[in-house]
Amino acid sequence: MTMTQPVINMFGDSLSEIAMIAKLTTARWGGQKVDKKVSAKVNTEMQAAKDAGKYVKVLATKRDLAMVNHWYRKACTFHEKNTLPWNRTAEGILPTANFYRYENDFREIRASFLDAVEELIFRLPEIKRAAQIRLGDMFYEEEFPSRDDLRERFNLSVEFLPIPDPSDFRLNIGAEKLAKLRGKYVQNVEGTVEKAMLELWQRLYGQVQRIAETLSNPEQKFQATMLENAMEIVDLLPRLNLRQDNSLELMRVKVEKQLLVYEAEELRGNMSARMETAGAARDIAAEMEALKPQLRAIEF
């Protein structure tokens, strides 16, 4: 009988003990409505087929939905940055080392999202009046959701789920079949974890390359966000480093100590500091490429 072992990190802990699945669920009202009457009229007048096109009316403008969409995008970006890819876009591997920070920060983002939703609901009569003027004869009040219905159309939540351990497979299908299922699961998860670890390398490498390419050209302007993004990944990596990869940690420390020494204003005004940082970035990028040749294939 073939024995299988759970996926482990370098300290021998099973993946189900050092990480979980964070499943993000979202929903939002787009503020648009297909007008079947107008669509049919346009298709007829243009001598087109009935299914040639649809006319989409804007009930609520981008400006009306701006704050709701801002916090929605912020939540999705936050989730993507703070987890590692699992088998679906909305599901990510969340290491326990990052759980409390993730939970706290997501709670704050969600609260701001819900506040924006309530503000939108409060402004619904105003949005209707503006739409009546903008849409003219295409305006139908019944196409707008009620306040309660509008509230139900928005959702932003996260569910924390355990990562199944191969030892939990207790199906009554025979020992040999069961061993194969466990082995296949271990293989799939191991592949997922390896891809997730490579993504961490790619995230750090991408920031190093941007710094190297930008600062190496004295004529190229840059925003402070370039350094802020590097600082963000440097802060986040220790909490996402599932395998406790010492090589990755060494590169992270080098980035912190060699590339984040100067403020953006210093790099703009001090050519010596700029070239020093650019050279250090090129050296670190070369080291990373030597350790992970796959990084050379990254396109920016």
Image (cartoon, rainbow, N blue to C red):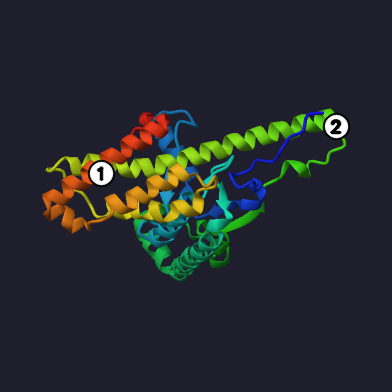
The count of marks equals 2
The residue under the point 69% across, 41% down is 6
Sequence order check: which comes first, mark 2 or mark 1? 2
- The kind of residue on which mark 2 rests is Ala
Compared with 204, 179 (above or below) is: above
The residue under the point 34% across, 36% down is 287
Q: Which residue is mark 2?
A: 175
Foreground pick, 35 / 85: 85
Give SS at disc 1: helix
- Cα distance in 3D space between marks 2 and 1: 56 Å
Q: Answer few, some or many: residues within 10 Å of disc 2's Cα (few below 14, many 20 plus, some between 14 and 19).
A: few
Give SS at disc 2: helix
Q: Is residue 126 visible?
A: yes
- On the rendered image, what quadrant is the N terminus found in? top right
Foreground pick, 124 / 161: 161
The residue under the point 26% across, 44% down is 211
- On the rendered image, what quadrant is the C terminus found in? top left
Task: Residue 162: give x, y in percent of width and height.
Answer: 67, 51
Residue with the most extreme bottom position:
122
Please name which of the two marks, 2 or 1, marks the residue nearer to the observer.
1
Left or right: 179 with respect to 206? right
Compared with 139, 290 (above or below) is: above
Q: Which residue is mark 1?
A: 280
Q: Answer few, some or many: residues within 10 Å of disc 1's Cα (few below 14, many 20 plus, some between 14 and 19).
A: some
Task: Residue 253: give x, y in percent of width and height.
Answer: 37, 51
Q: Quadrant of residue 59?
A: bottom left
Task: Residue 214: give x, y in percent of width and height.
Answer: 21, 42
